Amino acid sequence: TQLLEQSPQFLSIQEGENLTVYCNSSSVFSSLQWYRQEPGEGPVLLVTVVTGGEVKKLKRLTFQFGDARKDSSLHITAAQPGDTGLYLCAALRGATNKLIFGTGTLLAVQP
Amino acid sequence: NAGVMQNPRHLVRRRGQEARLRCSPMKGHSHVYWYRQLPEEGLKFMVYLQKENIIDESGMPKERFSAEFPKEGPSILRIQQVVRGDSAAYFCASSPAGAPTGELFFGEGSRLTVL
């Protein structure tokens, strides 16, 4: 069983549409991160959310941390082809605080 | 201001050979992590190292895989007697000591193909 489940697994939309991807867990986290990975590259950190209920905006991207700090969502407004990539949520786990990644959402934005 | 450097970017090995993947962390970073990724999947944690010390190797297969981060030089992920199932992208990430929320900086990965 995956600690961090992301949905949907795949998403293909047209340029200009809005979308939301989700990251869910039964565990509580002190913080949660979102990364984007483009083909052939390593993941790049987009945002870290720390406080339950927190909302952070990064241009057309809106990130929310659930009130109970068990889940998070990423909403993209007016998607563009440049938003295409693999979106990964991640959280610290275990006594050594290693970073564990979610299952990922692969987004394709068609022009 | 170089980021995390990984080499080689692409490596082809035949079954039974050894693969060595190298990672130089960002300047000033003393924590290194290795992850493995299959196509269109998330990243699977393998090992977490500090200089001369393995902190957490709970994601490493028990056999054939080893990792080190010596006092001088890059971190090395070593895979002995490779099999086709080892084909994957291996990513290295680094962080400064004591990063409170654990943000990692990733290299561009090393893609291993086992023939």
Image (cartoon, rainbow, N blue to C red):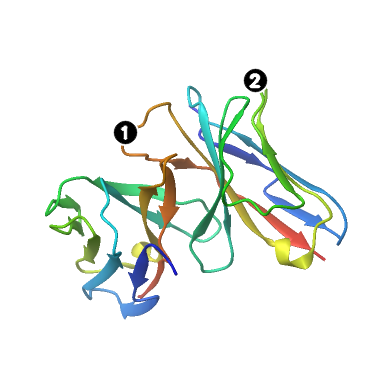
**Spatial separation of the CA atoms under disc 1 and disc 2:** 24 Å
- Which quadrant would residue B12 be assigned to in this image? bottom right
Q: Residue at x 17, y 52 (%)?
A: A57
Q: Residue at x 24, y 62 (%)?
A: A71
Expressed as whole percent of the image width and height from the top left, the position of residue A52 reads 14, 51
Residue of label 1: B100
In which quadrant will I find the N terminus of chain A? bottom left
Expressed as whole percent of the image width and height from the top left, the position of residue A20 reads 23, 71
Please tell me which residue lies in front, A42 or B67.
B67
Residue of label 2: B71
Rate crowding at label 2 as few (under 14), some (14 to 19) or many (20 or more) other CA atoms within 10 Å.
few
Please state which amino acid type lies under the numbered disc 2. Answer: Lys
Q: Residue at x 63, y 25 (%)?
A: B52
Q: Secondary structure at mark 2?
A: loop
Q: Residue at x 36, y 79 (%)?
A: A12
Expressed as whole percent of the image width and height from the top left, the position of residue A24 reads 29, 66
Disc 2: which chain? Answer: B
Rate crowding at label 1 as few (under 14), some (14 to 19) or many (20 or more) other CA atoms within 10 Å.
few
Expressed as whole percent of the image width and height from the top left, the position of residue B37 reads 57, 60
Q: Is residue B9 above or below residue A37?
A: above
Disc 1: which chain? Answer: B
B40 relative position to B99: left or right: right
Q: Secondary structure at mark 1?
A: loop
Mark nearer the N terminus (1 vs 2):
2
